[in-house]
Image: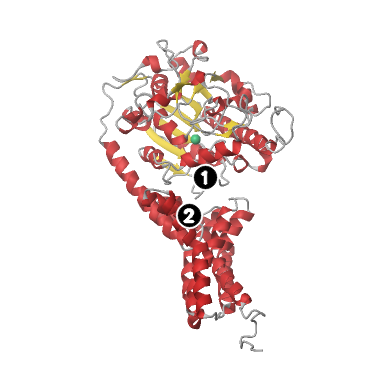
């Protein structure tokens, strides 16, 4: 019987252990960070799976040129190690995943700030961990040995590994999309969790979105200012705060009558709040909704967001110093338009740099910058606080101590045992959102301001709510009312109320679409200009009720009145709806 010379070869003659060491070596540079992210509960398991598959690619050159296996492994490993260091160290410092948004923030901050950050977070334990990480790679490299396969077997194995790691996804995405660029982007999503792609793709996306944003910013600079702007509060110190929530259906707030006490703090503040209970969003998606909320665009003239001033420019024109504090992602393809609005502000605080929106991130992080802005000595301030609110995955939105709804108490009978954890985690997210929004109000109130704070959510969310208890998520194509009904509350400071006395009682139940929000805001702020329409202001004596148009305005026949939403057939599967919602996120602006 012929025996091979290499001792570890198995009975089949193939050195499986040798292959295993090779794979482990390459996996190490992507897998360790992804496994840490997963194990710490920061992200789901998708990144780890991607890292596993993508790492198989590097076995190909080693199998094709076994004579140089160690040299090749060393060279590829060195590149992977270098490229993976950023993501590894970033996780150690921030406990989060590296992304294009981090690159954005790095280039946003000046050198001084960057050095300050480094000084703030530098610790010997991190240096030690980075050294240990490199040592681990080196020890694994010493285990790498050539694996000799018969030529045909080596070619076949290489083809297989190439297919599994990148080939299959590449071909699949190419045939799935008509646009090669769209195919490339979807392909990139499948491999970007692995080194060195995380850095390469992150940088490419950063450059791409930066170019888009700069073009958008430049075109916004061409927009003429409002004509004949007057300000009832001109020359007086004032602070106006707009808090934009996320995916929050008001029916799940005890402030709006929900049976579970999900908003205990706002309930306590109730006497100081104006609670509007008939406001709906025009569209159940963040960007599409806020494009109308924050500009003069609405369902009938959806394109106006390109050619009319945004709320930030309106307030700047009125002489306010403007601030944008956001816990949403920044330089992603979906969020570029919003980041453009934020860039129009005088100061920005970008707090969320996760690669994936489905990552752990708490809104409490806005409180510190909010306090900082309130302490700024500019006399007139306009502050936008953009929360992540109750966006899915709900369990990533609140720290453990807010996990208070854990059983069936207060849960409708229609909610199944399978749905219960999701249903409860949404209520816990609402409870944490209550903590954040009420803290913002309380911190604001403590400064004895002349001004007001207004909170509304961009859109709602269906989480097994009546009358379609099987629906989870949002889908414009199959609308249900919880996707549209949003909280809308106002805290007016005593000083402001004394200066501009208003009786809100008759306005609280008015049917209103947040697509006309800019008129309500201008009215509250005491601003007037040529295109101001008091009949579109929720708080004006001249308010006129209009149909609450929902749907995609790109297909005008698809617009329907909110009141015409019919309950769905019980056949609609919740999982399917979530899937559709995800797809829609991939649509361009
Ligand atoms: Zn949203």
Which label was assigned to residue 579?
A: none
User: In the figure, 278 relative to 32: above or below?
Assistant: above
Q: Which of 39 and 131 is in front in this view?
A: 39
Give the x, y percent position of residue 438: 58, 30
Q: Say which residue appears at 62% left-offset and 75% top-offset.
A: 16
Q: Nearer the viewer, residue 160 or 285?
A: 160
Q: Earlier in the sequence, mark 1 or mark 2?
A: 2
Which label was assigned to residue 357?
A: 1
Q: Say which residue appears at 40% left-offset and 49% top-offset.
A: 182
User: In the figure, 334 relative to 35: above or below?
Assistant: above
Label 1 crowd bin: few (<14), some (14–19), many (20+), radius 10 Å: some
> In the rendered image, is residue 234 in sight?
yes
Q: In which quarter of the image is residue 554?
A: top left
Q: What secondary structure is marked by label 1?
A: loop
> In the rendered image, is residue 73 in sight?
no
Q: Say which residue appears at 55% left-offset and 52% top-offset.
A: 96
List the residue tagged with mark 2. 117
Q: Locate the N terminus and report the quarter of the image it occupies.
A: bottom right
Give the x, y percent position of residue 108: 39, 50
Give the x, y percent position of residue 254: 64, 24
Q: What secondary structure is marked by label 2?
A: helix
Way the structure is coloured = secondary structure
């Amino acid at each position: 019987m012929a025996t091979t010379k290499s001792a570890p070869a198995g009975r089949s003659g193939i050195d499986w252990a040798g292959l295993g060491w090779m794979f482990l070596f390459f996996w190490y540079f992507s897998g360790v960070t992804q496994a840490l992210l997963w194990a710490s509960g920061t992200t789901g398991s998708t990144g780890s799976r991607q890292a596993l598959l993508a790492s198989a690619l590097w076995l190909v050159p080693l199998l094709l040129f076994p004579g140089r296996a160690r040299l090749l492994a060393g060279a590829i490993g060195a590149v992977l190690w270098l490229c993976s260091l950023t993501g590894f160290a970033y996780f150690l410092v921030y406990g989060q995943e590296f992304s294009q948004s981090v690159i954005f923030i790095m280039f946003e901050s000046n050198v001084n700030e960057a050095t300050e950050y480094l000084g703030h977070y530098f610790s010997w334990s991190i240096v030690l961990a980075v050294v240990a990480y490199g040592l681990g790679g080196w020890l694994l490299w010493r285990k790498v040995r050539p694996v000799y396969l018969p030529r045909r077997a080596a070619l076949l194995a290489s083809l297989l590994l190439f297919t599994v790691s990148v080939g299959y996804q590449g071909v699949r995405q190419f045939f799935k999309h008509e646009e090669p660029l769209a195919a490339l982007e979807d392909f990139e999503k499948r491999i970007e969790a692995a080194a060195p792609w995380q850095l390469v793709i992150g940088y490419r996306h950063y450059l791409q979105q930066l170019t888009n944003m700069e073009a958008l910013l430049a075109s916004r600079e061409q927009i003429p200012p409002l004509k004949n702007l007057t300000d009832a509060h001109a020359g007086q110190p004032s602070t106006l705060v707009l808090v934009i929530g996320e995916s929050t259906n008001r029916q799940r707030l005890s402030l709006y009558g929900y049976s579970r006490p999900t908003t205990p703090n706002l309930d306590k503040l109730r006497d100081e709040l104006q609670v509007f209970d008939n406001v709906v969003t025009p569209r159940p998606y963040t960007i599409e909704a806020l494009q109308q909320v924050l500009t003069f665009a609405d369902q009938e003239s959806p394109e106006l967001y390109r050619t009319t001033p945004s709320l930030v420019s309106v307030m700047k024109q009125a002489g306010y110093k403007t601030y944008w504090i956001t816990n949403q992602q920044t330089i992603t393809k979906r969020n570029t338009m919003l980041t453009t609005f934020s860039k129009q502000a005088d100061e920005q605080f970008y707090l969320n740099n996760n690669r994936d929106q489905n990552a752990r991130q708490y809104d409490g992080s806005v409180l510190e910058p909010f306090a900082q802005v309130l302490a700024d000595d500019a006399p007139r301030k306009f502050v936008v606080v953009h929360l992540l609110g109750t966006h899915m995955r709900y369990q990533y939105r609140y720290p453990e101590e807010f996990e208070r709804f854990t059983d069936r108490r207060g849960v409708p009978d229609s909610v199944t045992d399978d749905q219960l954890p999701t249903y409860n985690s949404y209520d816990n997210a609402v409870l944490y959102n209550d903590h954040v929004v009420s803290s913002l109000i309380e911190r604001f109130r403590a400064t004895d301001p002349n001004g007001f704070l207004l909170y509304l959510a961009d859109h709602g969310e269906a989480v097994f709510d009546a009358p379609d208890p099987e629906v989870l998520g949002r889908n414009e194509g199959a609308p249900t009312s919880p996707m549209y009904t949003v909280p809308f509350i106002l805290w007016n400071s005593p000083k402001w109320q004394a200066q501009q006395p208003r009786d809100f009682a008759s306005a609280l139940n008015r049917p209103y679409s947040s697509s006309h929000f800019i008129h309500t805001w201008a009215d509250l702020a005491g601003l007037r200009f040529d295109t101001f329409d008091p009949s579109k202001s929720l708080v004006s004596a001249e308010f006129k009720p209009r149909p609450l148009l929902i749907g995609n305005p790109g297909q005008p026949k698809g617009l329907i009145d909110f009141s015409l939403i019919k309950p769905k057939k019980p056949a609609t599967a919740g999982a399917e709806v979530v899937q559709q919602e995800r797809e829609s996120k991939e649509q361009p602006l």
